[in-house]
Image (spheres, rainbow, N blue to C red):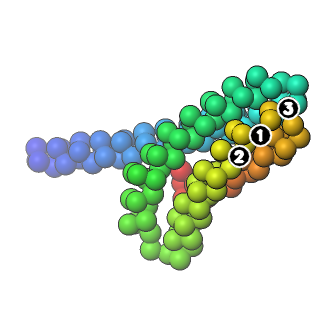
């Protein structure tokens, strides 16, 4: 009997750790979404606010994508069995790649320009698409 209790406790810890990791990823998604909404709602006169928000978004995205790409995605790839889950995996990787391409471009764009606003919208759309993929798999 005591062995069963230890196994149950260990199982609960694994489930709890997984749930905590997923909760953290979901929280990251929500923080980035909020920051992107705030960025999108700025005007071309709010250059300092735009730069500050973009810097905050970049930091959040860097940490978040590192965790996903080094821990979550490899585990997900090993576990997937269906074609649609495999497609979600590769789409998520590509979405991260495109964000990596867009981020330096938006950083080098004049924060007072219309192009900055357009690039901020594209960044938001990419992030929302990535979050949709994660929602499809429960993250």
**Residue 101 position (above or below residue 57):** below
Left or right: residue 91 compared with residue 129: left
| Residue 97 figure quarter | bottom right
Q: Is residue 135 visible?
A: no
Badge 1 marks a residue whose secondary structure is loop
**Are discs 1 and 3 less than 8 Å apart at CB?**
no
Residue 106: percent from the left, percent from the top? 73, 42
Residue 126: percent from the left, percent from the top? 70, 53
Disc assigned to residue 109:
1
**Badge 2: residue crowd in 10 Å (few <14, some 14–19, many ≥20):** few
Which residue appears at 39% of the width and 59% of the height? Answer: 75
**Badge 3: residue crowd in 10 Å (few <14, some 14–19, many ≥20):** some
Q: Is residue 64 visible?
A: yes
| Residue 113 figure quarter | top right
Residue farthest along the bottom direction in this orientation: 83
Left or right: residue 63 compared with residue 5: right
* Residue nearest the observer in this picture, 64 or 82: 64
Q: Determine the CA span between mark 1 and mark 2.
A: 6 Å
Residue 114: percent from the left, percent from the top? 89, 40
Which residue appears at 84% of the width and 44% of the height? Answer: 115
Q: Which residue is mark 2?
A: 105
**Residue 31 position (above or below residue 69):** above
**Are discs 1 and 2 less than 8 Å apart at CB?**
yes
Which residue appears at 43% of the width and 42% of the height? Answer: 21
Badge 3 marks a residue whose secondary structure is loop
Disc assigned to residue 112:
3
């Amino acid at each position: 009997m005591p062995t069963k209790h230890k196994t149950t406790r260990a199982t609960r810890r694994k489930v709890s750790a997984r749930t905590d990791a997923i909760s953290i990823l979901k929280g990251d998604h929500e923080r980035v979404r909020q920051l992107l909404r705030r960025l999108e709602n700025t005007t071309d006169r709010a250059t300092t606010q735009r730069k500050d928000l973009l810097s905050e978004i970049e930091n959040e995205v860097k940490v978040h994508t590192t965790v996903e790409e080094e821990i979550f995605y490899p585990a997900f790839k090993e576990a997937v069995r269906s074609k649609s889950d495999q497609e979600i995996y590769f789409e998520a990787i590509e979405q991260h790649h495109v964000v990596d391409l867009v981020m330096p471009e938006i950083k080098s764009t004049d924060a007072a320009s219309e192009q900055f606003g357009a690039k901020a919208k594209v960044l938001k759309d990419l992030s929302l698409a990535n979050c949709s993929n994660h929602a499809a798999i429960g993250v």
